[in-house]
Image: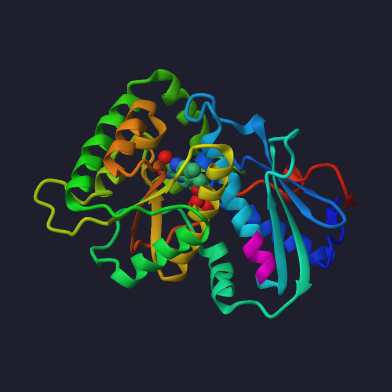
Amino acid sequence: MTIQVTRVGRLNSEQVNSVLRSAMLAPSTHNTQPWLFRCTGTGIEVHADPRRILPVTDPDGRELVLSCGAALFTLRTAIHALGFHPATTLMPSRADPDLLAVVRPLAERMPDQKVVRLARAIPRRRTNRRPFLSSVVPKPTLAALRHATELEHAWMPNLDAEQCRLLHDLTARARRAQLADPAFLAELGRWTGLGASTRDGVPSYAMDGSPADESWLLDEFGEAAGDPRPAPLVVAIGSLTDDRLDRLQAGQALQRVLLTATASGLDASFISPPIMVREARAELRRILGCGVWPQVLLRVGYGSPLPWTPRRPLDDVLLDTLISA
Ligand SMILES: Cc1cc2nc3c(=O)[nH]c(=O)nc-3n(C[C@H](O)[C@H](O)[C@H](O)COP(=O)(O)O)c2cc1C
C-alpha cells in the first residue's frame, strides 16, 4: 500500500510527505523516534508519543520532549526551505500536553539561504560516536553554535578549563553509576547494539563497539594519559526553567545547533550520563552556574564518515487523519 498524505495549507501532498520525512530524521534518545504527526487541512501537529518513553533512562519524559523539539525544528526548517513560512504555535492545548506544537505553512516566500543551508544538512547529520580528529573548532564556528542556541530561546554557557575538568570527572562518575544499575543496562540492551535491519533503536555499527564500551566517552575529552591531542569542544545547551515548554525549545535549539554544526563540516555526539543521572544533573547545574538547567551536553569536532541510523516507516508515525491509500 502506498501511503499518501493529502495537502496541508499551501503544501501539496508531495511536499507534506517530504517535510514529514525530513522531520523523522531528527535525533532521539536511543533512536526511539517518540513523535507522532497529524495532518489537518491547515497545519501539521507534532505530538509526543508517551508509549515510547524510556522508563529507566528518562522517567519524566524530559528527553522525549527534547527529541520531539528536534523533530519540530527539522519540520519548520524543511517547510521554510520549500518557500513557505512555518507559523508555529507551541503547546497549543492545556487539555492535551502531548500536543507539543502545530505548524501552519503560510504564505509563499523566498527562502532564507541560511535556512536552506540548514535544510541541506538534515539528511547529512549523524550522531558520530567515533574519535574525532585533532583539528580545533574555529572560534567563529563556536559563536555560530551559540547564536543558533539563542535563536531558539535556549542558552549555551561558556565552559572554562576548570569547568571542563569538573565535567570530565562528573561524566566518569555518572557513567559508572549507570553501568552499575541492572535496570539501566537492561534498557540500554533493548535499544542499542541492534542488527542492521532495525527500524528503531541504535544499530551496533553506529555504536562502534559494545553499548557499554566507554572508550568513545573518554575520548570526548581527549584526556587519556599522554594523549597530546587538544580536547574536543564540549558545549552545553541549557534553559532557564525545566518545564515542558523550555524542554521543547531546548530540543529545537539542539537541532539548530546540530544542523549548524553539520553545515560547517562538524560532527557531534551526546555526553548524557551527567544529565541522565539525577544527582549528577544537580551537580552539573552547579558547575554551569547562573541557575541554568542543563538539557544537553555535546562533544563537537571533525569526525570520519558514518552510515545513517534507520528510521521507522512514515505511516508508523502518522496519526489517523487524511491518509489515503
Ligand atoms: C536527547 C537525546 C539524548 C541522546 N543521548 C545519547 C546518549 O546518551 N548516547 C548516545 O550515544 N547517543 C545519544 N543520542 C543520540 C541518539 O542515539 C541518535 O540520535 C539516534 O540513534 C539516531 O541516530 P542519528 O542521530 O545518527 O540520526 C541522544 C539523542 C537525543 C536527541
Q: Residue at x 11, y 46 (%)?
A: 225
Residue 313 picture location, percent across and down:
71, 48
**Residue at the farthest front position:** 290
Residue 299 picture location, percent across and down:
34, 52
Toward which corner of the image does residue 117 lie, by quadrant? bottom right
**Residue at the farthest top position:** 182
Q: Residue at x 51, y 40 (%)?
A: 29
Q: Is residue 150 above or below residue 323?
A: below
Camera-nearest residue between 310 and 245: 245
Q: Main secondary structure of the magenta part?
A: helix
Toward which corner of the image does residue 76 lie, by quadrant? bottom right
Instruction: Please state the extent of the stretch shown in magenta in the rendering.
Output: 76-80
Camera-nearest residue between 243 and 237: 243
Q: Residue at x 48, y 40 (%)?
A: 241
Apparent side of residue 12 relative to residue 31 in the rendered image (left or right): right
Residue 6 picture location, percent across and down:
87, 58
Toward which corner of the image does residue 140 lie, by quadrant? bottom left
Q: Is residue 189 visible?
A: yes
Apparent side of residue 242 relative to residue 269 in the rendered image (left or right): right
Apparent side of residue 225 relative to residue 152 in the rendered image (left or right): left
